[in-house]
Amino acid sequence: MNQCERCQGRGVLTVGEKPCPNCNGKGTTESISLGEASDKDMKSLIESGSAKCSVCQGSGKIPITENCPDCHGLGREYLCVVCKTKLDSKKELCERCAKKPLVHILDPACDIRDISVGEIYQGKVSGLANFGAFVDLSDSVRGLAHNKYLKSRPEAGDAIMVTVRNILPNGNIELEPAELKEYNTVEVEKDLPLSKASDLHSQVGKTVMIKGEVIQVKQTGGPTIFTLADDSGLVFCAAFERAGVRAYADIDSDMMVRVIGEVSLRNNQVQVEIKSMKRLWGGDASVVKDQIEKAIDL
């Protein structure tokens, strides 16, 4: 969802001007609201008997506007999450894609705040009990599909699609298997503000998102260490698969990536413990690369 370039996010375009109805185009008024009047307005009213019109700010005119045709007055560009078609309302899907159920695939960094009751998610059976099956929707989101909703007994490790029936006050998640023949999928990323490498020292203990270029990948006897550069500096990011095993084997030097992880201190040095790392492509990668090159040129 991007800000509309034509209206700069306002949702309307100025197409002309008309006389201000509050001051009849004079720019001044003989009465003001005492609760909203400034000292300057009060002084002007006392000395000259009039004050600057609060509606037109003294210009005597107000703009004539109409809804922006590019964004239909929304101020932002809404795209179908499946086919990326531009939408004319604040929806997730276009009419064609809405004909099939939407299955959400959570990023590993997503937590319980990123799921919604009634939505369908892709998960994996992580354990079995006498009363049902535990299903992982992400690394930190686990729910229970009770036996009363299970038509057959799944096996640990099985991929499964489930509907979130309820999220209890104690955080327990009630799931029901969803049997789908045709469906669309969408990846759900953790929604976080973008942080800069230079600011991470003040965010120890917090989960952050940073974007940058992988400068170096180093495999240790434990985690894999990725050195990441953005337009503000460098930061070390650690990911652990198994002792001595390369994490994120598809990520290498010179790639632009998005990292979500928890900021920590290791030997008094800032480090990001990776929860999720994804390679950036196309325009997303170009923006990050351009920001880094501009910073180097300064």
Image: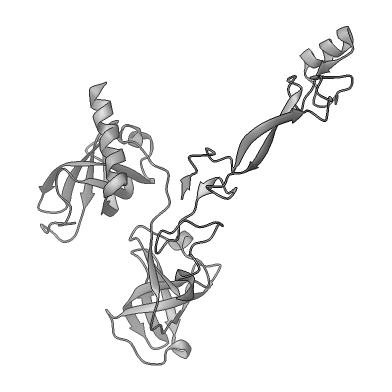
Residue found at the very far bottom of the displayed protein: 152
In the rendered image, which quarter contains the C terminus? top left
Q: Which coloring applies here?
A: one colour
Rendered residue at 10%/57% (across/down): 244
The answer to whether residue 89 is left or right of residue 218 is right
On the image, the x and y values in percent for residue 197 come to 30, 36
Residue found at the very far top of the displayed protein: 47
Rendered residue at 48%/71% (across/down): 98
Rendered residue at 14%/54% (across/down): 222
The answer to whether residue 80 is left or right of residue 20 is left
On the image, the x and y values in percent for residue 227 come to 19, 41
Residue found at the very far front of the displayed protein: 16
Can residue 230 be seen from the camera position used here?
no
On the image, the x and y values in percent for residue 108 come to 33, 61
Can residue 193 be seen from the camera position used here?
yes
The answer to whether residue 253 is left or right of residue 11 is left
In this view, the residue in front, 55 or 233, is 55
